[in-house]
Amino acid sequence: MVHEFTTANQRCDGQYAIVVSTYNSNITNKLLVGAVETLEAAGIDSRNILVARVPGAWELPLAASALVAKPSVCAVITLGAVIRGETTHDQHINRAVSNALMELMTTTGKPIAFGLLTCNTLEQAIHRAGGNVGNKGCEAAEAAIEMVRLSRAFAAELDGSFEAS
């Protein structure tokens, strides 16, 4: 019989860290508001929401690494906006940051939510920061909450150890 892990009865409390880029702050501030509102709506006390501002997307992994190492932090949400310019610089930043954050998540075993917008135009970024495509900061916070619940379901149902096959 197939066993499906359920998160319905799992807590999502704990400290959540948000690392947000100040580059393109007209976009990233909206992502931050969305993430904080989502966490608070899920019952996370504002005193358990840590915010670290970094200069740009490139710095997200380093700050996320420092925060995820804190035992009380159950998840890190990373927020930023890289908008394509005239060169391929955006592609290199996007790839390096996404790879570093994925590696950090898999090596620490803690959720690292990816809220880095990788847009072709400023208009696309605006639409994803509370516009007609929603707020990707909210979505990143929702993913972090769900992964905290899933991690706790693994721990509860597998006596604290989970091994992927």
Image (cartoon, rainbow, N blue to C red):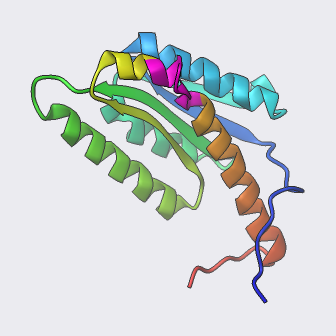
Q: In this view of the protein, which residue sits in the foreground, 103 or 71?
A: 103
On the image, the x and y values in percent for residue 75 come to: 63, 45
Is 112 above or below relative to 41?
below
Is 71 above or below relative to 41?
below
Answer with left or right where residue 153 lies relative to residue 135: right
Residue most extreme to the right: 9
On the image, the x and y values in percent for residue 117 come to: 40, 31
Residue at x 47%, y 45% (from the top left corner):
65
Q: Quadrant for the C terminus, please.
A: bottom right
Q: In this view of the protein, which residue sits in the foreground, 109 or 67?
A: 109
Is residue 51 on the magenta stretch?
no
Is 165 above or below relative to 129?
below
On the image, the x and y values in percent for residue 146 come to: 70, 50
Answer with left or right where residue 35 lies relative to residue 154: left
**Span highlighted in magenta in the image:** 127-137
Is residue 132 on the magenta stretch?
yes
Q: Would you identify the image quadrant in which residue 56 lies? A: top left
Answer with left or right where residue 93 lies relative to residue 89: right
From where the camera sits, is residue 50 visible? yes
Q: Would you identify the image quadrant in which residue 94 lies? A: top left
From where the camera sits, is residue 23 visible? no
